[in-house]
Amino acid sequence: MLKGIFSVSILISGFVCLSEADDGALGVSTETRTQYEITDSTEPSVFPKLLWEKKLSKPITSSAISKDGTKIAIADETGYLTVYNTKGGKLWTYRYIGKLPGRTYEFKSEKSDTALLNIQFSSSGKHIVCDLGVMNTWDSLEGFDNFERYEPYKKLCFDSEGKLLWQNSKKGDHVIGGDTYVLIKPRISDDSCGEGDCDPYAAAPVTYYLLNMKGQTVFTGKTGGQNAATYGFSGDGEYVFVHNKLVKSADGSIVWVSRGQFEEIYGNLIIQAGKVCDIVTRKEFSRINAYKVSLTSNYVAGMVWDLGIITVTVYEIKNGHIVWTRQYKNKEILGKDILFYLTKDEKHFLLGSETGMLFYDISGQKIGELKITPKVVWPQYFGYSISKNGEYVLLGHEKTIKLYMPF
């Protein structure tokens, strides 16, 4: 489900138990590109089973699998976006061709001038929305000589055949609602609070935008300037929430203004300030103590940590009973996502970090484990993406993409 679409996120690594309409010059590139073949796995049929892996020539900048498990998108520092089927067959490729903004400081870089970032599929895989990142460079920034970084320049939207549908200059985090809407919520600048200690909950309100799949603005809204503000859609895109406002996507009418943040929607359920409620009646079904959550029709998973101990608990929504709970130790807290997901068929729960993945059935029985040995301490890219019911898990790490069948 969606969470800032997965909203505010942190990576907790080192589990011991592992021992988200402007016109312009865009086009499909015709230049020759060296292809790197996908290697089928020769591992025995144990689960999680590695189906195939792909070695790239340059580091990954973004990767995603569609919720229906039929398409995989991979972008890297060559500037290309390539979409595959789950057997590894290439469907189409794209690379930006057009005028670029000037750099802050010019020097020769080995990286492509552009890269696609923050790839997301719509719910049925009919659309892809991503950021076009443009290389910017500085001289001696943050202690580095010739420091370089991809900065978001435009939003791009493609159909399933690779046709560019629209582009938009609005910047910020984006998330897709169903196959119909795209929410863009600008980030707050680190210097927006002025000098001294910055209160992330006291910054000026920001304007967010809801677009349709033609790139047209359906409505705009305002929310407090919190960097940590949650946001997301219901699975069908009918409802969108930003911070404490639940809104109908079709017309922007406000359904609910809450005293606390909304955290996740699934079906007719929403998590609001730790309470699982019905969207229409606002009836409260159960309460959870959690920072990170995953929601289905009948279950909710929550994660909390205290004094180096991570506790994961799965609750039955209608009666609030605990189905199972487990504790893990963490070594340090980093600023990236972990895999924390109840499959929407309500059969499995997946938990992952940079050191590996754990797989449980809904009763809490561990049914699989995958250990990951990082090649570098601080990987430039590390990310999970999962199909709706956990049929596939896509793992991107530095220059390698791996596709697993967990069950």
Image (cartoon, rainbow, N blue to C red):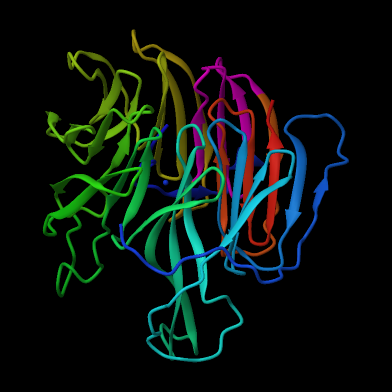
The answer to whether 379 is drawn above or below residue 163 in the figure is: below
Query: Quick check: is 344 in the magenta stretch?
Result: yes
Q: Nearer the viewer, residue 352 or 121?
A: 121
**189 sits to left or right of 380:** left
Q: Residue at x 80, y 56 (%)?
A: 37
Q: Residue at x 59, y 67 (%)?
A: 29
Query: Quick check: is 218 in the magenta stretch?
Result: no
**23 sits to left or right of 206:** right
Residue 5: x %, y % from top left:
38, 41
Residue 371: x %, y % from top left:
70, 43
Q: Residue at x 77, y 38 (%)?
A: 51
The answer to whether 269 is drawn above or below residue 61 in the figure is: above
Span highlighted in magenta in the image: 338-366
The answer to whether 220 is drawn above or below residue 245 in the figure is: below
Q: Nearer the viewer, residue 323 or 7?
A: 7
Residue 182: x %, y % from top left:
33, 44
**402 sits to left or right of 326:** right
Q: How many marks?
A: 0
Q: Nearer the viewer, residue 243 or 175?
A: 175
Residue 230: x %, y % from top left:
28, 43
Q: Quadrant of residue 22?
A: bottom left
Q: Quadrant of residue 293?
A: top left
Where, quadrant-wise, is the C terminus in this rendering?
top right
Name the residue furthest top. 319
Where, quadrant-wise, is the N terminus in this rendering?
top left
Q: Nearer the viewer, residue 196 or 38?
A: 38
